[in-house]
Image: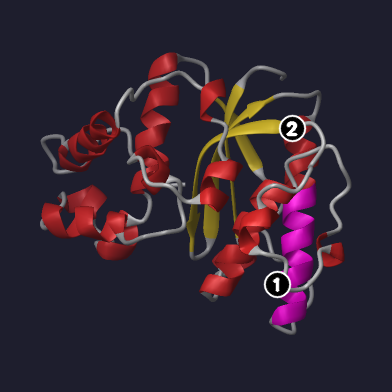
Amino acid sequence: MVGEYYHVYNRGSDKRNIFLSNRDRDRFLKLLYFANGTKPLHFADLPRGFPSWQWWQTDRGELLTSVGAFCLMPNHFHILIREKTEKGISKFMLKLTTAYSMYFNTKHDRSGNLFQGAFKATPIDNDNHLRYLFAYIHLNPIKLFDSKWKELGIKDKKGAQNYLKNYHFSSYHEYLGEQRPGHQAILNPTDFPEYFEEPKEFDDFIVDWLSYNDHEGSPRGLETV
């Protein structure tokens, strides 16, 4: 529904990895930008040797959605979205996943469905849920650092924080105030509540969730998708 917020995600078919290299991740990030517009996506038409900074200034037409946060994991992805046009999310995701599947299957010499069915779009029905998703999405990579952290609690908090800061395939760094032209072009933060007026507020918010365990050692609310 136009104006509403959604948590959008999908994973590889049979839980297979959908990103096998940084080149794959870079392609998906570019598609996050190019697919989010009313103009047809002709990725192959972009000239070779196109200066990197100009990729992120290409006219996409009117935006289909606003992206508030994203994270790429080895076998799935998460996007926090606000719909801007009628059926904008469906149009965006069709362009994104079709273009990426074509790229991936060609590059890795495979055929068939790359993704596990249709994408999932969970509506966000209250402010607490929306704010919480900024933690959930950006903390996803901690599973790669410590696969049991949700069940047992984080044992090396400093190491986990350093891991997040060295994980470049999410919007985490933008909320810490870093300048990455491509990632910034993907995001439309002004269409989301201003929960974090300064980067330190976001950093403290993430650290709080990283440390917030219940009596059994499992962070409250950080469900697995």
Three-letter amino acid code of the residue under disc 2: Leu
Foreground of the two, 140 or 59: 59
Q: Residue at x 72, y 34 (%)?
A: 89
Q: Earlier in the sequence, mark 2 or mark 1?
A: 2
- Vertical order, 125 against 24 (above or below): above
The residue where tag 2 is placed is 63
**29 left or right, relative to 43:** left
Q: Position of residue 144 (x, y in %)?
A: 33, 63
Residue 206 drawn at (x, y percent):
26, 38
Q: Is residue 150 above or below residue 13?
A: above
Instruction: Identify the secondary structure beneath mark 1.
Output: helix
The residue stretch that appears in magenta: 95-107
Q: Residues within 10 Å of mark 2 (few under 14, many from 20)?
A: many
Q: Residues within 10 Å of mark 1 (few under 14, many from 20)?
A: many
Q: Label 1 amino acid?
A: Phe
Label annotation for residue 104: 1
Q: Is residue 92 one of those drawn in magenta?
A: no
Q: Main secondary structure of the magenta part?
A: helix
